[in-house]
Every structure is written in C-alpha cells, then in structure tokens.
Amino acid sequence: MSSIRFLGLIRSISQSKNLLVKQSYFKLDAQRTFLTSSIRRNTDTPSQPNEGEQKLTNLLRTRFPSAKTIEVVDISGGCGAMYTIYVETSEFKNLRTVKQHQLVNDCLKTEIRNNMHGLRIQTAIPKE
C-alpha cells in the first residue's frame, strides 16, 4: 500500500471514529522517509467505545487497576482486527519499554490470538 493511500485510510478512519491523529516523518536517507502516527481518542467530543474496545479496556483495567489512563481505539474500521492501545500506569516504573509492551501483550494474548491482525501499543509512566 502506498503511503498516500495509507494516509487517506488513516484520515477517513479518524474522521469517522472521532480520533486525533499525530503524524511524524523521519528522513532515513535520500530515497526513504519513515512515517509514524499515534492515534488517540478525541476527548473534546467523546464517542462511545464499541464492544471490542470496551472488552479490551476491561481486561486492561483488571490487569492494571492503578492505571491513570487506558485508551483502546479500533483502527480497523469497526471489524476489531486492529487496535491502538495506550496505557499509562505507575506499574511501568523502572521497566524498559519492551517489558511494558510484553505486559500488555500478555494481558491480551487470548484476544490477540483469536481476533486480531495488528496491535499498536503505547505505554507511559505518569508524571508525578
């Protein structure tokens, strides 16, 4: 998929699901540019989470009860095949990013195995 078609897909999904998309471009060399994007729910005009988003949020709330923020967004257009997940908790303190992501993956391993094609994970430690 070309980057232009990919950006169009991200824009159409974000508009239909009321999401905020932050995109960053990194120049790798003269021929290649790397695009990253982070997707978060627009809290100014909140929308209701779908069934899949709610299920994953409940699983993460159970695993990380002291989490300050847990956001789950279905970025597959509603079919539940790909999600972006943001978890902010003090439980991640002194853990490397890889370990933080492993904890999230372990929590959702059954759902990942049975229903998902992709998962984007962002983790953070609350500022004190």
Image (cartoon, rainbow, N blue to C red):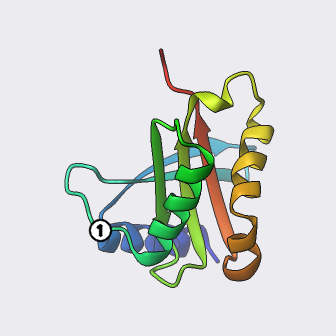
Q: From this viewpoint, which residue is outermost toward the top?
A: 128
Residue 51 horizontal/vertical position (percent): 44, 77
Q: Is residue 26 left or right of residue 68?
A: right
Q: Which residue is found at the position 67% from the left and 81% from the top? A: 115
The reply to whether residue 5 is in sight is yes
The reply to whether residue 35 is in sight is no
Residue 74 horizontal/vertical position (percent): 49, 70
The local secondary structure at tag 1 comes to: loop
Name the kind of residue labelled 1 in the image.
Answer: Gln
Q: From this viewpoint, which residue is outermost toward the left?
A: 45
Q: Which residue is found at the position 54% from the left and 71% from the top? A: 6
Q: Name the one closer to the observer, 62 or 121.
A: 62
Residue 81 horizontal/vertical position (percent): 60, 79
Q: Which residue is found at the position 45% from the left and 41% from the top? A: 69
Q: Residues within 10 Å of mark 1 (few under 14, many from 20)?
A: few
Question: In the figure, 103 relative to 107: above or below?
Answer: above
Question: In the figure, 1 relative to 7: above or below?
Answer: below
Which residue is under mark 1? 48
Question: In the figure, 3 relative to 51: above or below?
Answer: above
